[in-house]
């Protein structure tokens, strides 16, 4: 904590303007330790470039098998590490599988080393030891001293350009290494091809294609130095090839400007004076080298690093000021860091001229929208996209348009599942795009063709070959024999189908409404009334005999056990409660969930979270139960929702490097934090309703894009006063435990009267 | 010969128009046996697509070393072979190294086989036995019966689209295989990446990148079937990969439309009735799948194969009619086939919308010109480009513009050396682009910025790091210690430098003229007066001691020995003759060259030619001596030029599959044939002069693009009357043995009076 607070004072002054300086509350270092899988580097809101240090670049493959350790490096950076390999330009935030880490740059001096060396002996390669004492991570800015060669590294970014500033000691042998082989979740043949041109003594352009989580992913770049290099060279680490072209006519290792191959590292040599700063601008494009150069020229002029940093922080400040909260300093750090982590996903994926690469690997021009990528939809449909629908509706409109473009470009005719950089990696279950589309349309955010969107939802949901959908349609569930995730898939499809029905109703498409309303009840087919839990069902209609309600593996679920998944009927909690035996039984069940003891053996199987990411048997670090604490509202025990929410906010989010109990999952964990801190949560995205909890802020003013403001105030708020006595919407007491989306977008005030005792009425 | 003549009668009727039907004289089969390295398939003049059968697809690498046998398959087809593997869409004509063979298609029926099988046992795979008896090869059309599965295959093409017509037997199991791994000069990891989308049941798009002679070559395609396939599938021959994406959610081997990887073969299944024709249109693009589709739509409408064939043959007929000759039937076949082989290089390399991929791997739009590729300049600067300057000036203007675009896109700032498909493979010596540029400018063909062209020439010629240019500039020659081709490089640079001087003079750039005129005399530095031969010189100025005038290996030359190369001073034969000791000595030397006995051991070392490609010691099958027979004109013995030329025409060009004595080298051998048949030859491209020989035609009318005609008539012409009594230009007797370019372009008539006895005056 001390260290964290220290950052506030170390921070460079932020642009002074009419807005509050809220950047100081953003601590990108939160979540970089243990399971958060966030990165500490520099990016702007929803920026294409995420320029951040990588502390190791392990191989995904070890002896032809998956190397489990690589999982710790999903974001490239592990707080526990003592060395930095370099600074690369693309990173996911909070994922549980990975890719990216494009174009790693490392400044060194002294003897040139083209291997990274080992973490134990950083001097054996170009990597360097570093200390957190010499590290500053802010929104849009990162600084670290590289101890091995006494070089200060600073990073900032615009949307499509990463800017580096390296302060060298005096040296005749200063180098900047451009590692074109390095990557996150790397392995020997991941880089399919690299092409580089040294255009002149300050400008390099090129691209590389990788084959990883994204199957065919190409990133183009333009790289500019603030000072001409003296010389440069490259080493090709590929196996020696039988002579094919006549390239042997050149010494390609030194000052040869036309470079290509599979495994290449380059270096650029400089002479530096004491404390001389060399700056690098590194622009990305999904389309071409020419576009990367255009992006660079459009977004950065000149070499004023501080100006770019100030712009980046001003951009952040503008976004952060959309919600002004009154809360404790720690809660402000948690809240604004959550906002920061929420607002770095999805990422912009088009050039300044509007061009981007589509799923079909053709170049498209985004017509009337900005194109986005990195859709971790199994996570983010729950709270991130609903949050964007309130605070970033224009952006979420563009995101839905990007998803529709993906659909149009899809040979399979499917909306995205888990999509990044013109590829779908098909990670996780469900077809939750339909939730995002429905929520945006129901809430009036999407201004495209809603009927076309519904058609895309229907086509996706009827893709019989995909993940048991055929069985699901025919039988109403997925037989346990045919899928390891038969129950969670059935449950998630049923929720998604409800979204489709909801959308169909809005569009007066009765047939579709009827069909998908029926499908949305399929959750009942995997509910075993005899035990009151969701349970795998066999093709013959019988429930699977061997069943362990605590285990998360081999029981028909993904990232959760039946204790968590049995509550997954967000589309109809009332019906679920009936099936489970009524309010009382469900109340006891929920109480057990939060208080039970989960034996370590079951935790060991749980993915993506720390031990602290579990409260009793409730797994907050994974997503399936994110709505569960709100279910007490449905059984007449809202005070339990209130105390659980406040407990989760307190236990699962801390302003420390290890402050996140599980993967942030592209902002979903953070969006949950913000919603719940503000006192309401979208239990069923696709519905207009938010369920009320217990605000952790004293006051919050949401500045909406429509010019209106929505204020949350929590009177008598304190750590002890977690219970809600009554709630007033614009001065009128609310009868139930919900508010509507239109209540927010209409502007007004939501007043919670807080108290220290449960209010049981 | 019988077989060849048979083709004439088998030929399908050509479009009837005002032009003579000359297509019947084109025999693409000429040169497909032994060393010609031509291909028999379908293409249009300078067409992007060369759709032709491949009779084997050997690996360039065998146990990590170069596999010599692959050399026989430079054009994919070897007349000697008994089986066809399939039909691919890109081929070089007449090269001595290779690449291409993109997108091999093969129709089969019966059991699906996804391996090509062996030549000895074609039924072991998808390849098929065939017979030349069932084969027809015409300009723009190819037909063969595939014996194994009783399928008739027909091919034709537009500029950017190959069209296939397969006549199947009745079968429930008819297949069309799309082999995305196959290639010419192939090897395991040559295909860097492949991407394919099955858009619908008749349309496929995709691309593949290869790393071969061209380092980074990507070809995009769109493929359309005349009839929907019933089902389809793919096999990925790559090593099994550790699971990275979540693609296992799909059965990707069958009916899965989103395909990518390193080593892929696809197949499409059909049911066919007896004699049912399935047609395939296959469009290429250097830029994108979308452009390939646009190319297809622009160039081919509907499914009328015969119409496309007739268009292709009409295009050929139009080109062929630009020269109407009167000659024997065999000579007509030789002449028009030479014209055909000359007019398929270079090839168009841009889409219908003008876009193409540049050397910098960026997409460019050709502004005011058509972009071309496949520049085998060491060969083609000699006669092909000069021939184009007479008969295709608009096209050669575009070719020079394409070379200037290449230069503009070159990170090295060099004009092309041997360039194809947005790459330079740096094959062979010299910087002969400068000859092509100079010749086009001197002859008024290039309408671009001549000074900019000269600058490009100078920059290229001063590239000190390239192939000994630094030494050449400093010492006036390349020391034998530092290069295996020190003498031929010195000689070729000297000639090229003369071109630059010539161009500089025209542009009044005196400094450049002086500098390069001096450099153009550097040939003298490697001429050893003591033996009268060019000879490798050491760095210390002494000639290399061990020297074998007959050998072509290790003596300082490439594709030739000093007997051939010692005559290589095309820029100044007069000075060479002086150095060699005057007319008489040179006369004896030339006589010896044509009459000497070259021991087999030396022939064995000679590349790219058959034994018949050598006359005495004169190697016609390679290029360095192509001008030598004309040198008799310089020593007052023109009758020897006349008899040698007629002898070479007779011995080196025959209307049979093995009719070419050496690689056609992208039309250079063919251009030599046409020039010499017409009675004149450009000994020094860059000069306006043509040296006169002995016409083999009785009459030829050249229809020039400027609307004028130039007629060559050879009175009293016969196989015996090879000597020239006198020559009249527009009725006026010529004093010397040259005519000027302006004599031709001005229109008029050149009349040779032929006789059976040498005319010694």
Image: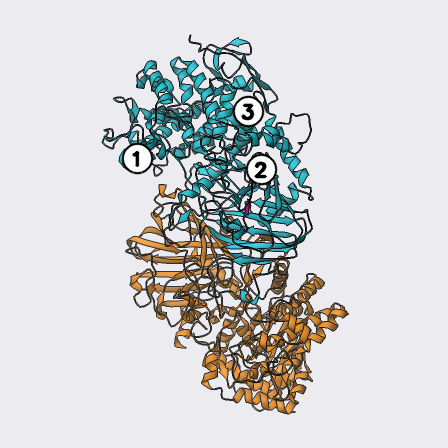
Chain colours: A cyan, B orange
Q: Quadrant of residue B377?
A: bottom right
Quadrant for the N terminus of chain B in the image: bottom left
Task: Identify which residue, B231 or B332, lies in the foreground.
Answer: B231
Residue with the mark numbered 1: A554
Chain-order first, disc 3 or disc 1: 3
Mark 3 — on which chain does it sit? A
Task: Answer left or right for A321 relative to B452.
Answer: left
Instruction: Determine whether B277 is above or below B462 in the image.
Output: above
Closer mark to the observer between disc 3 and disc 1: 3
Residue with the mark numbered 3: A330
Task: Answer left or right for B448 relative to A340.
Answer: right
- Residue B560 coordinates in the image, percent (x, y): 54, 79
Graded by Cα atoms within 10 Å as few (under 14), some (14 to 19) or many (20 or more), the crowding at tag 2 reads few
Q: Quadrant of residue B387?
A: bottom right
Secondary structure mostly seen in the magenta stretch: loop
Boundaries of the magenta span: A126-130
- Residue A531 coordinates in the image, percent (x, y): 27, 22
* Label 3 – label 2 distance at C-alpha: 21 Å
CB under 8 Å between discs 3 and 1: no
- Residue A175 coordinates in the image, percent (x, y): 61, 53
Circle 1 sits in a helix, a strand or a loop, which is it? loop
The residue at 63%/31% (across/down) is A9
Decide if residue B747 is in sight here: no
Graded by Cα atoms within 10 Å as few (under 14), some (14 to 19) or many (20 or more), the crowding at tag 1 reads some
- Residue A168 coordinates in the image, percent (x, y): 65, 48
Chain-order first, disc 3 or disc 2: 2
């Amino acid at each position: 904590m001390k260290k964290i607070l220290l950052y506030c004072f170390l921070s460079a002054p932020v642009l002074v303007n009419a807005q509050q300086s809220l950047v100081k509350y953003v601590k990108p270092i939160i979540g970089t330790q243990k399971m958060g899988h966030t990165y500490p580097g520099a990016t702007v809101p929803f920026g294409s470039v995420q320029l951040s240090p990588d502390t190791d670049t392990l191989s995904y493959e070890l002896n032809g098998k998956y190397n489990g350790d690589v999982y710790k490096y999903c974001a490239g950076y592990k707080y526990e590490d003592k060395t930095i390999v370099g600074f690369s330009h693309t990173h996911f935030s909070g994922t549980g599988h990975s890719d990216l880490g494009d174009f790693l740059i490392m400044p060194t001096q002294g003897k040139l080393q083209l291997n990274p060396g080992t973490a134990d002996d950083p001097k054996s390669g170009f990597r360097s030891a570093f200390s957190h004492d010499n590290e500053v991570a802010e929104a849009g800015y990162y600084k670290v001293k590289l101890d091995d060669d006494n070089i200060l590294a600073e990073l900032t970014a615009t949307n499509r350009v990463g800017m580096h500033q390296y302060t060298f000691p005096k040296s005749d042998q200063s180098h900047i290494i451009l590692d074109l082989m390095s990557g996150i979740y790397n392995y020997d043949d991941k880089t399919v091809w690299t092409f580089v041109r040294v255009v002149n003594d300050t400008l390099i352009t090129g691209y590389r294609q990788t084959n990883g989580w994204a199957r065919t992913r190409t990133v183009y770049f333009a790289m500019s130095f603030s000072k001409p290099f003296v010389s440069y060279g490259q080493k090709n680490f590929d196996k020696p090839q039988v002579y094919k072209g006549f390239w042997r006519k050149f010494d390609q290792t030194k000052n040869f400007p036309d470079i290509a191959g599979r495994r290449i590292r380059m270096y650029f040599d400089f002479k530096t004076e004491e404390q001389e700063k060399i700056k690098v601008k590194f622009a990305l494009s999904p389309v071409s080298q020419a576009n990367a150069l255009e992006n660079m020229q459009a977004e950065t002029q000149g070499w004023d690093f501080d100006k770019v940093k100030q712009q980046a922080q001003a951009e952040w400040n503008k976004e952060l000021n959309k919600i002004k909260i009154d809360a404790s300093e720690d809660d402000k750090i948690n809240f604004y860091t959550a906002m920061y982590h929420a607002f770095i996903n999805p990422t912009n994926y088009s050039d300044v001229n509007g061009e981007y690469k589509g799923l079909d690997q053709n170049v498209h021009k985004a017509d009337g929208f900005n194109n986005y990528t990195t859709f971790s939809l199994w996570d983010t449909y729950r709270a991130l996209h609903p949050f964007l629908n309130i605070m970033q509706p224009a952006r979420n409109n563009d995101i839905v348009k990007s998803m529709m473009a993906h659909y149009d470009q899809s040979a399979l005719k499917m909306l995205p599942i888990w999509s990044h950089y013109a590829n779908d990696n098909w990670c996780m279950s469900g077809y939750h795009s339909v939730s995002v589309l429905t929520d945006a349309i129901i809430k009036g955010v999407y201004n495209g063709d809603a009927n076309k969107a519904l058609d895309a939802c229907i086509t996706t949901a009827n893709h019989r070959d995909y993940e048991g959908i055929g069985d699901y349609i025919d039988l109403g569930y997925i037989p346990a024999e045919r899928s390891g995730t038969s129950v969670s898939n059935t449950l998630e499809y049923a929720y998604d189908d409800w979204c489709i029905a909801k959308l169909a109703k809005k569009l007066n498409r009765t047939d579709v409404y009827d069909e998908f309303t029926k499908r949305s009840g399929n959750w009942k087919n995997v509910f075993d009334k005899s035990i009151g839990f969701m349970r795998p069902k066999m093709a013959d209609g019988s429930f699977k005999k061997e069943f362990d309600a605590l285990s998360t593996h081999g029981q028909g679920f993904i990232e959760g056990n039946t204790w968590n998944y049995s509550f997954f009927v967000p589309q109809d909690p009332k019906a679920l409660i009936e099936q489970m035996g009524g309010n009382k039984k469900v109340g006891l069940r929920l109480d057990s969930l939060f208080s039970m003891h989960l034996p370590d053996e079951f935790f060991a199987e749980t993915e993506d979270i720390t031990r602290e990411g579990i409260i009793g048997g409730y797994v907050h670090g994974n997503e399936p139960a994110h709505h569960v604490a709100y279910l007490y509202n449905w059984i007449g025990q809202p005070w339990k929702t209130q105390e659980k929410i406040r407990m989760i906010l307190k236990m699962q989010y801390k302003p420390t490097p290890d402050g996140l109990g599980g993967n942030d999952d592209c902002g979903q964990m953070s969006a949950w934090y913000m919603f719940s801190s503000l006192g309401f949560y979208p239990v069923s995205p696709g519905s207009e309703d938010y369920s009320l909890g217990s605000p952790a802020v004293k006051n919050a003013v949401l500045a909406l894009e429509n010019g209106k403001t929505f204020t949350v105030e929590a009177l008598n708020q304190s750590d002890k006063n977690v219970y809600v006595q009554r709630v007033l919407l614009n001065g009128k007491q609310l009868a139930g435990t919900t508010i509507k989306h239109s209540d927010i977008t209409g502007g007004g005030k939501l007043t919670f009267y807080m108290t220290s005792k449960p209010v049981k009425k």
